[in-house]
Image (cartoon, rainbow, N blue to C red):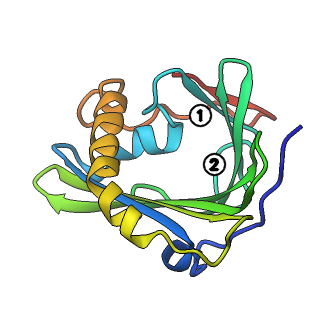
């Protein structure tokens, strides 16, 4: 039975004021267009697949399900998408209780000369202790989270030859499947 945390708009202050805010940043020797491939397709995490429930082109209101084999990890509701620059979404369904709201934002920055950076922010508001802020813990976790961002997207980039972005989606359909 999935649990449904609260909706979060892309411009919400949850991204800066949530009790738990994790931000990771990594730089890559590829253009933002190439880096966008694993961002949009979710081909950056081994064993996890992403299934779009809405037809391309994806935009605000699109939904994507993340699966570990047959198990639902979450359903993402896209709130902002600017291809090659930003993807923001909130988690609409999770398999476990205890989360009041959770949102994620991935921002790509062009560093010039076929270099780019990815900043990944996850904001979490638990149901228990909603006013307890864990900023010191988040600050300690930042280098670890940044390393995970680097490792994950380097893994995903191996699936996209240099200069290539995510494969074009087929004609509109009710379900479009991207697999890791």
Depicted 58 relative to depicted 148: above or below = below
Residue under label 2: 57
Q: Place residue 54 in its image quadrant.
A: top right
Where residue 97 sits: x, y (%)? 79, 49
Q: Is residue 130 among what the camera can see?
A: yes
Check disc 2 and report its element: helix, strand or loop: loop
Residue nearest the viewer, comparing 86 with 83: 86
Labelled pair 1, 2 in contact (Cβ < 8 Å)? yes
Check disc 1 and report its element: helix, strand or loop: loop
Depicted 72 relative to depicted 40: above or below = above
Residue nearest the viewer, comparing 154 with 71: 71
Q: In the image, is 90 to the left or to the right of 7?
A: left
Residue nearest the viewer, comparing 173 with 62: 62
Distance from the alpha carbon under mark 1 to that under mark 2: 8 Å
Whichever of labels 1 and 2 marks the residue nearer the N terminus, that label is: 2
Where residue 138 sits: x, y (%)? 40, 63
Residue under label 1: 169
Depicted 67 relative to depicted 153: above or below = above
Q: In the image, is 109 to the left or to the right of 37?
A: left
């Amino acid at each position: 039975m999935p649990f449904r945390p609260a909706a979060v708009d892309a411009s919400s202050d949850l991204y800066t004021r949530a009790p738990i805010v994790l931000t990771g940043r990594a730089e890559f020797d590829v253009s933002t267009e190439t880096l966008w491939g694993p961002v949009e397709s979710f081909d950056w995490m081994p064993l996890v697949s992403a299934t779009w429930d809405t037809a391309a082109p994806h935009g605000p209101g699109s939904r994507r399900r993340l699966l570990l084999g047959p198990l639902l990890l979450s359903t993402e509701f896209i709130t902002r998408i600017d291809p090659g620059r930003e993807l923001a979404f909130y988690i609409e369904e999770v398999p476990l209780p205890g989360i009041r709201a959770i949102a994620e934002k991935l921002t790509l920055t062009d560093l010039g000369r076929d270099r780019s950076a990815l900043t990944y922010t996850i904001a979490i508001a638990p149901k228990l202790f909603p006013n307890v802020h864990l900023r010191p813990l988040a600050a300690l976790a930042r280098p670890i989270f940044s390393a995970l961002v680097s490792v994950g997207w380097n893994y995903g980039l191996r699936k996209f030859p240099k200069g290539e972005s995510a494969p074009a989606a087929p004609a509109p359909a009710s379900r479009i499947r991207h697999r890791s």
